[in-house]
Image: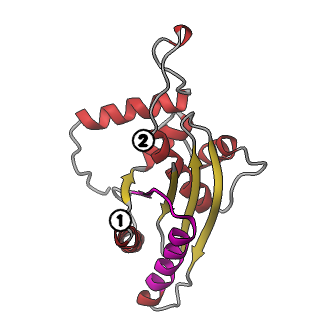
Amino acid sequence: MRVLGIDPGLTRCGVGIVDVRPDRTATLVEVVVIRTPATMPLEQRLLAVGDGIERLLDAHQPSAVAIERVFAQQNLHTVMGVAQVSGVALHAAAKRGLAVALHTPSEVKAAVTGYGSADKRQVQTMVARILGLAEVPKPADAADALAIAICHAWRGAPATPATAGDAGTGSLTPAQAAWRAAERSSRTSVVRPRLAK
């Protein structure tokens, strides 16, 4: 399964592509950070980000696109930029008939680290380990995009049959088991909007 993950942002938009095999091993295909200057007109920034995403979609032909969903932030300007870039990415994927999923930061953290409140450094370290990289992908937007792609691929990948010694968890790593638990919890819990403090 090839997944293109997007960490949306106007100044820096991380885009990571990974291949994930049925045994859940993941391989880096490409990772880039599309940058636009704050001095550029908004429509030109969105065009630049959209063109960059479309080039990567066409070059790598992913089977799915995963985008980070941001629930709330203190900075309204940042939220608007993330929402606008997400819309551009959704449009590009839809034009190509690709399935798109939105994952919250806590879902992504649980998927790759086993802990939904992990910090950025822990996520970056686990992304490098999962992909067998000698160094942590930089900047953080690059690692975040790869984490989103890995999260989505692991979510959709079938579990292998359980063996006698693993108590019915199949080949799930602790991080993958935590993701499954977070996914089950999100299906049964009621999400209420949070007010900014």
Q: Does 16 sit left or right of 178 as displayed? A: right
Q: Which residues are magenta?
A: 45-68
> Horizontal and vertical percent for residue 162?
49, 16
Q: Residues within 10 Å of mark 2 (few under 14, many from 20)?
A: few
Position of residue 64 relative to residue 183, above or below, is below
Q: Residue furthest top?
A: 164
SS class of the residue under badge 1? Answer: loop
What's the residue type where badge 1 is placed?
Answer: Gly
124 and 169: which is toward the camera? 169
Confirm whether residue 117 shows in the render.
no
Q: Quadrant of residue 137?
A: bottom right
Q: Main secondary structure of the magenta part?
A: helix
Please give the name of the residue rendered at 54% of the width and 77% of the height, measured from the top-left corner.
52
Position of residue 141 relative to residue 43, above or below, is above
Q: Does 184 sit left or right of 188 as displayed? A: right
What's the residue type where badge 2 is placed?
Answer: Gly
Quarter of the figure that contains the C terminus: bottom left
Based on the picture, tell me whether residue 46 belongs to the magenta stretch.
Answer: yes
> Horizontal and vertical percent for residue 187?
26, 36
Position of residue 101 relative to residue 74, above or below, is above
Position of residue 30 relative to residue 56, above or below, is above
Please give the name of the residue rendered at 37% of the width and 54% of the height, measured from the top-left corner.
101
SS class of the residue under badge 2? Answer: helix
Q: How far is disc 2 from disc 1 in space, using C-alphas?
A: 18 Å
160 and 39: which is toward the camera? 160
Q: Quadrant of residue 126?
A: top right
Q: Residue furthest right?
A: 134
Marks 2 and 1 in Cβ contact (< 8 Å): no
Q: Residues within 10 Å of mark 1 (few under 14, many from 20)?
A: few
Q: Quadrant of residue 14?
A: bottom right
Disc 1: which residue: 97
- The numbered dot on residue 156 is 2
